[in-house]
Image (cartoon, grey):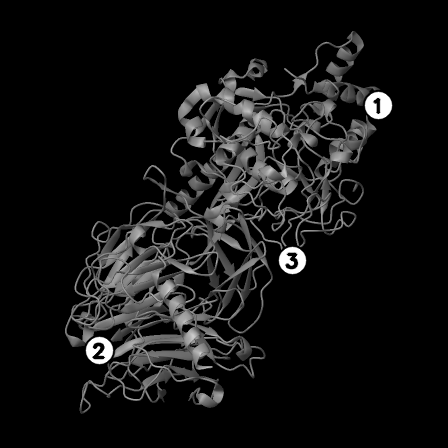
Amino acid sequence: MRALILLLATILSAAIARAADEPPMKPLGDVPVMHEEASAAGINSVYDGPFEFFVGGGGAAFDCNGDGYPDLFLAGGKSPAKLYINHSTQGGALRFEERAISPETDRGVLTNVTGAYPLDVDGDGFTDLVVLRVGGNLLLKGGPDCTFTLANSLWNFDPAKAWGTAFTARWEAGQRFPTLAFGYYIDRQAPGAPWGTCEDNALYRPQAGEKPDYSQKTPLSPGFCTLSMLFTDWNRSGLPALRVSNDRQYYRGGAEQLWKVEPGRVPRLFGPADGWRKFSIFGMGIAAADLDGDGYPVYALTSMGDTMLQKLDDDARGDPASAAPVYHDIAFERGATAHRPYTGGDLKPSTGWHSEFADFNNDGLLDLFIAKGNVEQMPDFAAFDPNNLLLGQWNGKFAEAGDAAGIALNKKGRGALIADFNLDGNLDVLVINRGSNVSLFRNLGARREDGGVMPMGNWIEVRLTEKDGNTDAIGATLNVKTGTRVQTRYISVGGGHASGHAGWVHVGLGTAERAELRVTWPDGEQSAPYRVFAGQFVVIGRGAKGAAYWYPGR
Amino acid sequence: MGAGIGTARADEPAWTERAITSHIDFGKVATGGEAAIAGLVARGKELFAAKFTDSDGRGRPKATQAIVPTKRKRGETAGFQRTGGPDASSCASCHNEPLPGGAGDFVANVFVSEGFESADFDSLDPSFSSERNTNSLFGDGLVELLAREMTADLQALREGAVRQASATGKDVDVKLESKGVSFGWLAIKANGMADFSRLEGIDNDLVVRPFSQKGVFTSLRQFTINAMNQHHGMQASERFGVRWTGAHDFDEDGVADELSPGDISAVTAWQATLPMPSVRHDLPGDWQRVAEAGAKAFDGLGCAECHKQTLALKSLVFHDPGPYDAAGTLRAGEVVKSIDIDLAKQPWATRLQRNDKGEWLVPLFADLKRHVIVDEGVAGLGNELMAQRFVERDVFRTAPLWGVASTAPYGHRGDYSTLDDVIRAHGGEGREARDAYIHADAATREGVIAFLKTLVIEDK
């Protein structure tokens, strides 16, 4: 028996060694050419500052002037946050112009910003901003033509004077306004800080009334130095739970968290009795996507070292009432660990921050973008730590394309905004860097044999709209059917690393010229099917008989 | 095959059972310019007539006929299958009347099923498939050029309206018309939203799709790729290859990259250069006289409202790839240089008349538009149950009538053996002209038939 165990151990070791020696998989499809043009586009925004700004570094991409192009709000850390208006033209080079944030907004409060998420809180059709800060978060009420007013008092929002680092929101059943969840990092005033002094997180539920009223705060205790949180319908119950990713660097006895948040009830943590297994990572960012078309989200969790891809166990599925949140990590088998730099020769572990699934080459397969960068000067982690562009492959794996795509810069990435900034159907990405200007990568298309660029797969971009309250249909699910394949997009706010975007939802279609769309609206109501052609900007209003098309005015 | 444009197998014996012994290199043809065109067209003719074999990659055991690469859920596709395909060894097996590239008899009908969920289906049940008669391809190079120019016109009108609405902040109404064909109206709101409710006979992306009985395919190239897969199980790498499927042998028949972009270009080029149908002038005196009267009656009865005698074309240069194909069909931006075929240099082009603007008058007898062809009273052509590519079951492209005397039977399924029968089957938007025909005197009706019988496909 002993001999057999030794033999098996030898075989296993050899297999691992072979796997380790295998060259990484090369992408088989198109590699997008990502052209860095932040300065040329008119953006000069640096996220920087002392210890409080080693983490954070995010922003928001959203259309604040109704022209369909995503504008930008970028955190500056110790420097004031900045607003950039998008003047790009369709398919052209990116152009932005800085604009002072509305005079009525006290610019002093826009310092110490760590990140932001766009959200139409009051349902007036103008996107508002949830701004994360060190020393008190902000709610900025959006108005016409990119104007903003501070709405903390107006909406009875009394933020904790804490270190804001994470946010997510959802509309609970019967509510006109969203429930807001805030994540906080270290309580710097507590004895022994920063070690073991994590701040509690908080839930703000809207109170009855004609305008948002966030006077009631529900603590989410314990907090474990949260850096990302996301409301997500993990079990297809229609009742999203709150996933919280925490930084083990500073907590004691902490772990990743999943909160059950039922309307009108006090949130409670999932625990071992529910099937939730304790695990600890340097949690920095959460991304969720239905990778396998099975209706269940897979979660990409960034950390220091390995990125995790958490997939719900097969035997934990089924009736949502009895489904258990039991996950296993598939990052290794999918080639998505992204645990060390793929170029540059530094073999120390990576530090991953923003994570987000998106289809950068329009082949109909989701890719995974991870912003990377050393915390500051951590000697045990890679100093040159380029962002990842892990392209989804037809065998279910991911293949690294960051170097070939041109995003492997020597910067300290933090948050990221993935959006189609010039409305050409190709997703671009803006990375907020610590200590240097943002990187703005314009997606030019795939490389052609002569060195030029060429178009990639077909695509559509979709906006869902509702009246009265949840105007952007946060919490909806969009299914896009092409042939036998169904792709899913979750309409959400939160996750990533201190960064979020609102507006067009991009879907790559590969070779399909048409698609059939179905929407599960936030309250669970299913839409009729909508037939659309590729290459279009599609607006689906709740209850509309047909999908409407929109065209950029420039 | 033209010298120097192919990649040949060195070890191929003379008695090979392969139809494809070399692949065309698209780039070499494109850079070869005009000198390479004759060889390309000749190779296209060979491929069109070739009987593909398993050695070429004929068959698709693990893939369906769907136009989007789709694996079978289970089992294998039969080597040949009359309904779901593959159903032919060769393009010319069906497109052969009166010449290769022509139409087909009823026996050559094909079955149009999306093939996503049901790779196999019962051809007797129209809820799974629509049965279609084989179209003629003669003159299709001109047809595609007309469609391209019309698409450009319509999309320019849309762009103008979008810009105007954006600049003025007001809603804009624009009449969509190209080459004298009205496609209705498009409204662009001040906020950029489009209102397609008054669109007529065209998809709301404003791409004129001139091919198939339904008018749902954009280009000869696209149609060729679709048909090669559906009917022969020959998969073009530009759609079924590694770029879009992660596999060189998507259908798992043991043959990788069965058709190169250059091969598809060859078949496209041959089809694009097929002569346009002609008009018989060697007629006995009485036929000539009756036909001339019938031509006038054709207009007078209202047939020419849709079957427009000519459409004016600005350029005869056929660029391959074309400008409006989508991913999965080679696109202009994917190649360094296109293959450019000047159709004006084809011998048959001397038969094209020109208008006072110098435009070429293409005697198509069609409008490249789709129409409802069925109503409650006349519903014979409404014998399909499935919509196709978002186009309702009773809506079809105006059939081009050039060459119609050579392409019986008639109707999208080939249900009608005579021209008189198919005219009488027009309902819907064709109902008024059809009634006028029926209520006309016998001599007038005879004249219309005599006129249509002069429109033939000839080898010249």
Circle 3 residue: B74
Circle 2 residue: A134
Give the chain of mark 1: B
Task: Decide if residue A486 is on the left or right side of residue B291.
Answer: left
**Label number found at residue B441:** 1
Kind of residue at disc 1: Asp
Give the chain of mark 2: A
The quadrant holding residue B433 is top right
In this figure, what is the number of numbered marks? 3
Task: Decide if residue A21 is on the left or right side of residue A292.
Answer: left
- Mark with earlier residue (3, 1): 3
Could you tell me if residue B444 is visible in this image? yes
The secondary structure type at the circle numbered 1 is loop
> Vertical placement of B125 versus B378: above or below?
below
Q: Nearer the viewer, residue A330 or A56?
A: A330
> Vertical placement of B319 versus A492: above or below?
above
Count neighbours of disc 2 (C-alpha within 10 A) and say few if under 14, some if 14 to 19, many if 20 or more. Answer: many
Q: Nearer the viewer, residue A346 or A386?
A: A346
Count neighbours of disc 3 (C-alpha within 10 A) and say few if under 14, some if 14 to 19, many if 20 or more. Answer: few
Question: x, y (%) of residue B267?
Answer: 56, 30
Q: Nearer the viewer, residue A8 or B101?
A: A8
Kind of residue at disc 2: Val
Question: x, y (%) of residue B310?
Answer: 60, 23
Give the chain of mark 3: B
The secondary structure type at the circle numbered 3 is loop
Q: Nearer the viewer, residue B318 or A390?
A: A390
> Vertical placement of A533 versus A140: above or below?
above
Count neighbours of disc 1 (C-alpha within 10 A) and say few if under 14, some if 14 to 19, many if 20 or more. Answer: few
Task: Decide if residue B101 is on the left or right side of residue A128.
Answer: right
Residue pushed farthest top? B285
